[in-house]
Image (cartoon, rainbow, N blue to C red):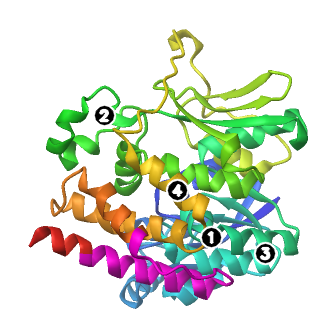
Amino acid sequence: MKRISILGSTGSIGRQTLDVVDAHPGKFQVVAMAAGSNIKLAIEQSVKFRPSVVSVATEAGARELCAALKSPSTRTGAKTASLPMPEVLFGPEGLDRVATHPDAEIVVSAAVGVVGLPATYKAIQLGKHIALANKEVLVAAGEVVMAAVKRSKIALLPVDSEHNAIHQCLRGGESKEVRRLVLTASGGPFRKLPLSKFSKITPEQALAHPNWKMGQRITIDSATMMNKGFEVIEAQWLFGVGLDKIHVVIHPQSTIHSMVEFVDGSVLAQLGPTDMRMPIQYALTYPERVPSNTHALDWSALKKLDFEEVPAKKFPCLTLAKEALREGGPLPCALNAADEIAVAAFLEKRLEFLEISEVIEKVLGKMPRTAMNSIEDVLQADGEARRLARIEVERRRN
């Protein structure tokens, strides 16, 4: 039985991780979990999965969780009435305690935002294996994090469907045999929309992803294709290849999750349904594959596989991400931070869709070029980029 901790248990990836745990009784034990502000769901998860440590975002949330778990109405039934109370924590300290739980062998890093970075880094330092769903860990701090991974000799398994697919395909050859990695992108909701109409895009339109149901920020990042830019950055760190060996193609069906092209011309592709439980299960069970009855590709619905090149003028965020990776230093971190601020402003209708990339470009141009030697350096660069992005957003409103 593998013992796991989950950072972000009430988020989309966290919930689906628990679905995988629930579907494989006796295979996993949840020893600790960190939720956000969804206390109702955290209560349900605590009762069902019985972790010894639970953390939430705020002290008020922790008090609410404690009161609910002590309530006789919550602890009804023979199986739950005699359960010991978990230790309830909150805030960054709580995240750290969940990530570094002494019994945890695998930490699922699925907390949204840079808030999950320090806790994930501490887990790596302690030799915990990581199932990584938090983009910020490698986008903002790839150099620092991968150095720690190498020192600790741990496995860092990607949960993102694209990188998970590449990880699977790379098992079919040696690194020296790889010609390039091919990341597939759905193209989002605006793949066919003319650039002339981009200035009128609303948040409601951008949130209507054709294939995936995700959180708001990642859905907007899919619409701008910034998410694919982040994945290019992550791919370099995860697989040790240069930018010149990472290619992005639009594949609107989202059936092929990514591909690896080898030097002899062979291409290995990983196909699967648009169901995140599949890559989560792969990351948790690696190097073993275990049966699953919860997800399977519907071959009868698979009629064709289309591929298109990415139109750079429509999706400048992908170009910005490549430029940030090429220059390195604080720029990938700033890219992520500025994007988060700009996307939030767009969702609040304080920015237009096309201004998202413009704000990010301005921030990248103004960022101090400093070395990234520690998590503290990363967090400082993140804070400065957010400050610059807020200024730029306000400037455009006035």
Residue hosting label 1: 50
Density class for disc 2 (Cα within 10 Å; few <14, some 14-19, many ≥20) is many
Q: Secondary structure at mark 2?
A: helix
Viewer-side label of 4, 3 = 4
Alpha carbon distance from label 4 to label 1: 46 Å
| Disc on the earlier residue, 1 or 3 | 1
| Disc on the earlier residue, 4 or 1 | 1
Alpha carbon distance from label 1 to label 3: 31 Å
Viewer-side label of 2, 1 = 2
**Residue 219, position in %: x, y?**
37, 48
Amino acid identity at mark 3: Ala
Residue hosting label 2: 190
Q: Secondary structure at mark 4?
A: helix
In the picture, the quarter occupied by the C terminus is bottom left
Residue 158 visible within the image = no
Which stretch appears magenta?
Answer: 365-391
In the picture, the quarter occupied by the N terminus is bottom right
Q: Which mark is residue 148?
A: 3
Viewer-side label of 2, 4 = 4
| Disc on the earlier residue, 2 or 1 | 1
Alpha carbon distance from label 2 to label 1: 43 Å
230 left or right, relative to 359: right
Alpha carbon distance from label 2 to label 4: 23 Å
The residue under the point 12% across, 69% down is 397
- Vertical order, 6 against 215 (above or below): below
